[in-house]
Image (cartoon, rainbow, N blue to C red):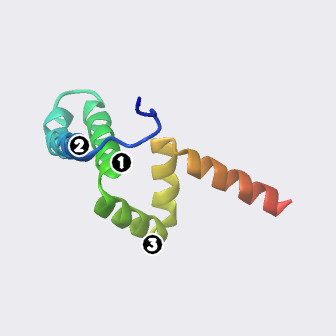
Amino acid sequence: MSRVSSQRPGGLIRILLLGVGILLILVSPLVGAIPGPGGIFVFAGGLVLVLQNSHWARKHFVKAKRRWPRFGKLADQALRRRSARRRRKREKQAAR
């Protein structure tokens, strides 16, 4: 059977992706020292990989979003989260 593309990667691949994400986050200050906005993009890419592959990180990210809603809104926009777009759409419809 072929694997459906919407399924998450299994065991070893998830660990490798998590490791790459952590490495990107750690390297981002070094890239940030180079002129230009490169460090921001490297950090964002690492954060996306970590959040996609770590239940612990996702749980703490959600807690931070609840504690600081403005941060959560900015993070959702930066990560272009579909769930955030659906939530905003529901809020607009409820306000009508």
Disc 1 target residue: 52
Examine the image and state in which quarter residue 92 appears: bottom right
Front: mark 2 or 1: 1
Image quadrant in which the C terminus is located: bottom right
Query: Please, what is the three-letter code of the amino acid marked with disc 1?
Result: Gln
Which residue appears at 65% of the width and 50% of the height?
Answer: 86
Mark drawn on residue 21: 2
- Which residue was labeled with disc 3? 67
SS label for mark 1: helix
* Residue at figure coordinates x 13%, y 37% from the top left: 30
**Spatial distance from mark 3 to mark 1, Cα to Cα?**
21 Å
Nearer to us: label 3 or label 1: 1
Q: How far apart are the two marked residues, 2 and 3, measured between alpha carbons?
A: 24 Å
Q: Residues within 10 Å of mark 2 (few under 14, many from 20)?
A: many
Q: Quadrant of the N terminus?
A: top left
> Could you tell me how far apart the alpha carbons at marks 2 and 1 are, in whole angstroms?
10 Å
Callouts 2 and 1 close, C-beta under 8 Å: yes
Which circle's residue, 2 or 3, is located before the other in the chain? 2
Type of amino acid at the residue the image marks with label 3: Arg
Q: Is residue 22 left or right of residue 59?
A: left
Q: Decide which of tag 3 and tag 1 comes sooner along the chain.
A: 1
